[in-house]
Structures are given as C-alpha cells and as structure tokens.
Image: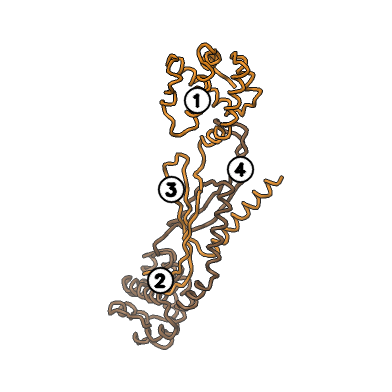
Amino acid sequence: MLLDLSEEHREHLAFLPQVDSAVVAEFGRIAVEFLRRGSNPKIYEGAARKLNVSSDTVQHGVEGLTYLLTESSKLMISELDFQDSVFVLGFSEELNKLLLQLYLDNRKEIRTILSELAPDLPSYHSLEWRLDVQLASRSLRQQIKPAVTIKLHLNHNGGLNTSILQTDPATLLHLVQQLEQALEEMKTNHCRRVVRNIK
Amino acid sequence: MELSEYVQKGFQMLADPGSFDSNAFTLLLRAAFQSLLDAQADEAVLDHPDLKHIDPVVLKHCHTAAATYILEAGKHRADKSTLSTYLEDCKFDRERIELFCTEYQNNKNSLESLLGSIGRSLPHITDVSWRLEYQIKTNQLHKMYRPAYLVTLNVENDDSRTYPEISFSCNMEQLQDLVGKLKDASKSLERATQL
C-alpha cells in the first residue's frame, strides 16, 4: 500500500533535500520527540536561525516529516511500500535511505503513541487485597464475617483511579472461576483460528 | 443489656394473666417477631380478633416492649439463661418463659441475619462479566491484531439503591496478573479458615 502525499505535504518535505543529512536526522529526532512530548515552537526558531531560513519553513519541514512517519506507522506499510512512496518525491538515494531508517527505527514507538489516541476505557493497572474478619457491629456483636477488601487501580485519561471494594469468600471464588474461563477462551480452537487468519 | 423502664413495664403487663391470657400472650409474642422479621408486616399484625378485647394502648406498649427486648437480645446474642433471668425479674411464670424462649430460638437465625445485614460497608462486588475481543484497527492505528478483554464488575452499595459498575479493559498479561492476585487472596482465605 502506497502513501498518498498531498501537494502541500510534498512542498513541505521539499525543504529536506536542501539541508544536510545530519540536519534531516536531527529533524527526525525532533519530530519523534514532539510526538512524545508535544511540540515546542522555540526549537523551530533556533533551527531557523542556524540554517538561515524562516521559522515557518523549518516548522513545515518537521511537520511534514512527522506526518510522513505517523501515516507510515499507522498503516504499518512495508519497507518496499515506504521506499516506493518516498521515491515520488525525487530525493537523493542517501536521503531516501535516511528516511527509511527513520521510519523503521521509530515505528514501534510511534504506534504505541498512536494507540493511546483510541477511545479510552479505564484499563487495569494493578490490584491489592486484604483479608478482613468482621467481629462486631453496632447492631450485632460476636460475629465472624470474613471479607476480602480490594484496592483496584485503573489507568484512565493519564491518571490513576483507585476503587476500594469488598467481596465475600464465595463471590471471590466465583470471580476467580469466571476470569479463569475468560483466559482459557484464548486457547480455544476458535480464537486460535481467528488470530491465525486475520492478519 | 440495658433496658428501659418502659420495656420492663411492658413485660410486667405481658406477664399478668389478667391482662393477657395464654392465647393473647402467644399471639402478641408472635406478632412482635413478625413485625421485626417479616418484610411485609405492617400495623395490621396486631389486628387479631383474639386481641380485640385488650386496651390498644396496652397492646401497643407490650408489642413495642417485646420487639425492643428481642432486638437487644439478638444484638448481644443472649442465651437462654439470660433471657430466663430477665423474664423472671418481670414476673413471668415458668410456662410463659418457656414459650418466649422457644419462640426466640425458632427465630434466632433470622434475627441475627437481619441484624448482621444492617450497617455501612464498602461497595460490594456481586458478580463479574467479561468480553474477549480481537482489535483490528482504529482510525489512528491500523493492523493492530491483538486480543483484549473488557471486564465489568457488578457492584452493590449498602443502600441497595445504587448499582455502580466498574468496567475496565486489559490485555492477557494484565488479566493473568489480576486472576493471580485473586487466587492468592482465596488461597490465603483457605489457609486462614484452617487455622
């Protein structure tokens, strides 16, 4: 599958052959850093001064590169497809090689970052438990009521939510049994067939 | 067990065969237990024809006294001798003491169950449901091809009116971690019950 690069995109990327490979590599590094942490316009100004061009040009160059990398990573295109897509830009062999390397080196991390953009449900972080026995309450003395107190940590929207819950021994066994069945499900023929065939 | 004069007076009236004959005594006793333990019971519990001849104020007083005493006894897990002692002090004859203790014994489990269920507690997990999915793509990321679980814990709050649900997603390793920890807890529970 080839990448479809728009006119505007090609224009932005046209800046890249005008600088050395070291600069392109640096732009690549900046692009990934911006994906990790967010963009920082001051960097554009510094680079613009050093290269003696406008800061807009630098910005477009970096953004073009970023888009190239994210689209390629999103679609998980093959090496060959990447090379063919970039070929239409008419860059030098050396630059093409550099761009390919940039793609391959950073693809995994970029995909991880992109996966965080998906509709987000709270996800499991960890769980702590404690065994308690209730001995008495205001309304009844001399009890022996076992309970399991659970602290469930979930990740949501970047933060950690903690829920404190309780359950009784019978329900605990039921939970374990049900969730073990859930795990077993992945090992069934049906699931194995699906995983094998949808690639 | 601390019981008020009101309760004591009520029981003294109940002890008197002049105010309550055998039949009326049994009926009132049963009515007291019923009011406490039967969820559908209402004021009509005292509307029995064999109780009509008794002054309603006296009836109410004795009913309340009996119910109060039963709750206190239940709360403190009173045994037969404690019950007998108190009833003797209220001038109950042997027969009525026996009747009371038998009725109490018959209802003891329900009573303790009811008392034990009153009180505040943490949200309680009652059930779990799960869903296994195979993620193919999102609009931000294609070719994902990975399995994921969605787990929902059904939770009950102690006022039984709110039922918040806790849902979360996890991958296989995370679910294994979760199940592993829950298994540790249940093994620990097993060991504790064998001590």
Q: Position of residue A171 (x, y in %)?
A: 55, 50
Q: Provide the secondary structure element on which disc 2 rests.
A: loop
Q: Provide the secondary structure element on which disc 4 rests.
A: strand
Q: Of callouts 1 and 2, which one flags the residue occurring earlier in the amino acid sequence?
A: 1
Q: Position of residue B102 (x, y in %)?
A: 60, 27
Categorize mark 3 by other alpha carbons within 10 Å: few (<14), some (14-19), many (20+). Answer: few
Q: Provide the secondary structure element on which disc 3 rests.
A: loop
Reply above or below: A68 against B47. Answer: below
Q: Position of residue A155 (x, y in %)?
A: 47, 56
Residue linked to disc 3: B164
Instruction: Give the amino acid at mark 1.
Output: Ala
Between circles 1 and 3, the one closer to the viewer is 1
Q: Are marks 2 and 3 in contact (CB under 8 Å)?
A: no
Reply above or below: B131 against A84. Answer: above
Quarter of the image containing the N terminus of chain B? top right
Reply above or below: B113 against A150. Answer: above
For chain B, give the colour. Answer: orange
Between circles 2 and 3, the one closer to the viewer is 3
Between circles 4 and 1, the one closer to the viewer is 1
Residue linked to disc 1: B32
- Do marks 1 and 2 share a chain? yes
Q: Provide the secondary structure element on which disc 1 rests.
A: helix
For chain A, give the colour. Answer: brown
Residue linked to disc 2: B137
Between circles 4 and 3, the one closer to the viewer is 4
Q: CA distance from mark 1 to mark 2?
A: 65 Å
Q: Which chain is home to disc 3?
A: B
Q: Which chain is home to disc 4?
A: A
